[in-house]
Image (cartoon, rainbow, N blue to C red):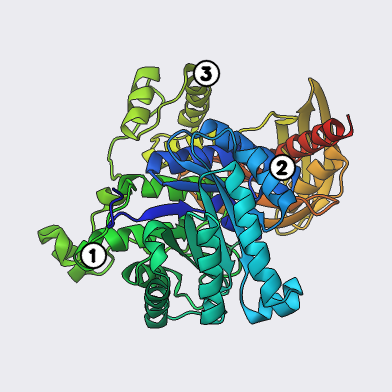
Amino acid sequence: MADKNKVTIFDTTLRDGEQSPGMSMNLKEKIEMAKQLERMGVDVIEAGFAISSPGDFQSVQTIADTVKDCTVCSLARASKEDIDTAWEAVRGAASPRLHIFLATSELHMKYKLLMTKKQVFDTAVAMTKYARKYCPDVQFSAEDATRSDMDFLEKVIRGVVKAGATTINLPDTVGYAVPEEHRAFFKEIRRRVPELTDVTLSCHCHNDLGLGVANSLEAVCGGARQIECTVNGIGERAGNAAMEEIIMALYVRGNIYDVTTNIKTTEITRSSSLLTNITGVKVQPNKAVVGENAFAHEAGIHQHGVLAKAETYEIMTPASVGLKVSNLVLGKHSGKHAFRDRLTALGYSLSEKELASAFTSFKELADRKKSVYDKDIEALIAKEAVQVPKTFTLDTFVINSGNTITATATISLNRDGKQIEKVARGSGPIDAAFKSIDKIVGRQLKLDDYQIDAVSEGEDALGDARVVLSNENGGKYSGRGLSTDVIEASIKAYVNAINKMYYEEKKEKEEREERVE
Ligand code: KIV
Ligand code: ZN
């Protein structure tokens, strides 16, 4: 018999999260993220929206083939074509799920769907039945459920449950609900539809009023037993409910919620950092659970209290979310064994090939940086994990810059063994460097975002540069570069984004050619 207190964690970082601006990921990045979600113990990974693009189809299919310990799900509109495509993508999974959605609110039906209530009801029922022919695990989402007429919502839920839906998701699509009301909403649905005892009731909260997490917790109190959420709370507009906050609230305040999940809380920090490393989008320093300051105590009185007894100002330990505080440092004399041991202690298990490549990067870094900290190592590994084939590599760069001259950059890149060198002027050293790379590549690229941070402390701290650029068709590509020299880090990040662009464009071309054949 199913455990009534077990809450299913449905992660939609790779679907609702990924579809928000600046969060797009390539196939390799999505696979790395999916593997980490599996390691963390999520129950369901929504890997994408298979029909939305050939790239999405491929990533859903590859994740379905790769991940073994989670259910893998694809989103589909309530149409046969969508469901056929979603099934084609997930059918190889150890545990596949089809997720159909159709809006039930007056606003959506009238202005977006241009459908009557009867049409929506009939379509929802017919498409659930259709999906059940393929798959025993079918989730139905009543989009904009929280703004739907209760009687109609009840009717739709009854209809799709009878048609075979095994999970009913009631999204707060526009983040309109407030906590007390949200608990009452779930309770009321449970009261009206007693058949839901054999079906999982799910919540999916957006964060437009900053209430996504609070509403998810209230939904649990109202009887929801699946929570849909994303790592770092990424998602449409203000985002989705943040997984790490929900999990730690359930864990720290177990006395209130009295439910369990499969999540290994010690994998939370790593999941958050991996996503940041992949997308280049950092969480705010004061973000609950995973922000840089979440466990920092600045005020003397707090520091004193924490030293005397951690619980005075800490409601959870840094270790419980996998935040490792270590004074162990590696340096240029550290060998492969020490490096491997440190990686193992940090929870990484790399193949021999990956280890060799990571060790080379570590050695390069250790030559320039006296002390290599865990944060430096984690940054290196995250970069290695999502490496794409290198169309261009950096050979040399010379920058001339100052407050009385126009910055000039001379950059030489290597493409297929051939060196290409160009000179460009710019409004500063980075601008000049990027312009000179644009000349080498011969493309009209637009820099959308550029950030630089220090990975760890000290004068020789590793500079971590991230860029997001878009190509002539509006495709966006992020890149990351690490170096103790911030200009070199920036150049590497830019070249890395260009390499991703070439990799993605090549794949898209191959897919187009395959479709023509
Ligand atoms: O917010 C929403 O309503 C959704 C559905 C597709 C589940 O993301
Ligand atoms: Zn959503």
Q: How far apart are marks 3 and 2 (CA)?
A: 27 Å
* Residue 457 visible in image: no
Which is more toward the observer, 141 or 288?
A: 141
**Residue 306, can we see it?**
yes
- Separation of disc 2 and disc 1 at Cα? 40 Å
From what the image shows, is residue 187 above or below residue 197? below
Of the four image quadrants, the one with ligand 1 is bottom right
Q: Mark 3 points at which residue?
A: 353
Q: Which amino acid does label 2 sit on?
A: Gly
Query: Can you tell which mark lies on residue 55?
Result: 2
Task: Give the x, y percent position of residue 301.
Answer: 18, 70
Comparing 461 with 27, the one in front is 27
Q: Do the residues labelled 2 and 1 touch (CB within 8 Å)?
A: no
Residue that label 1 marks: 253
Inter-mark Cα distance, 3 to 1: 43 Å
Location of the C terminus by quadrant is: top right
* Comes first in the chain, label 3 or label 2: 2
Q: Is residue 400 or residue 510 the one in the foreground? A: 510
User: Mark 1 belongs to which amino acid?
Assistant: Arg
**Which residue is at 58% across, 73% downward?**
144
Question: Element at badge 1?
Answer: loop
